[in-house]
Image: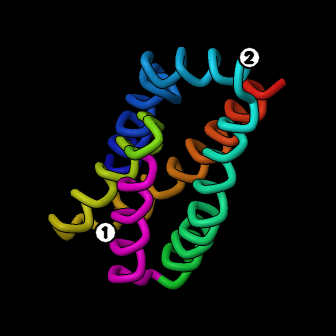
Amino acid sequence: MNNNNNKSDKSRYTHIEVFDNETQEMLKEFAQTSPDLVQDIIDSFEPEASVLIAEIRESVEKKDKTGLQKAVHALAGISGSIGAKKLEMVSRDTDKLIKSNSMDQAYSLAEEILFAYDELIASLDKILR
């Protein structure tokens, strides 16, 4: 039964856009007029985010509650700062589960963070093309 809840929790993110609409439009416009600016956004976000993603993977593997909470909290913050709506939401929801001590659900939802991150990077690459 708990596994079904995890599936339905994860499916709630499938309809959420990678970026909020305003950010999506702005990035598309900048990609046409100032591609270097979009690249700067990626260059400032991606190195820190990739470290946090690695920390999330490791924390899930080791069942490290404290490490996971620190990493998802930080990832939610930097994701929000660039308008990465889906990654921010999944990270914040995972953080809430950790704070409520729902660790099985938090570890499961952390996997969705990895998918949202990959989707974000692919979307940024697509915008630059």
Residue 13, above or below 112: above
Label tally: 2
Image position, residue 84 (x, y; %): 47, 37
Query: In the rendered structure, which segment of residues is drawn in magenta?
Result: 63-79
Q: Secondary structure at mark 2?
A: helix
User: On the image, numbered disc 1 is attached to which residue?
Assistant: 103
User: On the image, numbered disc 2 is attached to which residue?
Assistant: 32
Q: Residue furthest right?
A: 129
Q: Quadrant of residue 99?
A: bottom left
Amino acid marked by disc 1: Met
Q: Is residue 127 left or right of residue 61?
A: right
Indicate the quadrant containing the C terminus: top left, top right, bottom left or bottom right: top right
Image position, residue 124 (x, y; %): 69, 34
Binning the other alpha carbons within 10 Å of mark 2 as few (below 14), some (14 to 19) or many (20 upward) gives few
Magenta-span inclusion, residue 74: yes
Q: Is residue 99 left or right of residue 12?
A: left
Q: Which of pointers 1 and 2 indicates the residue nearer the eye?
A: 2
- Residue under the point 46% across and 19% down: 15
The majority secondary structure of the magenta stretch comes to helix
Q: Is residue 24 left or right of residue 37?
A: left
Residue 78, above or below 20: below
Tell me the number on the disc at residue 4.
Answer: none
- Residue under the point 52% across and 70% down: 56
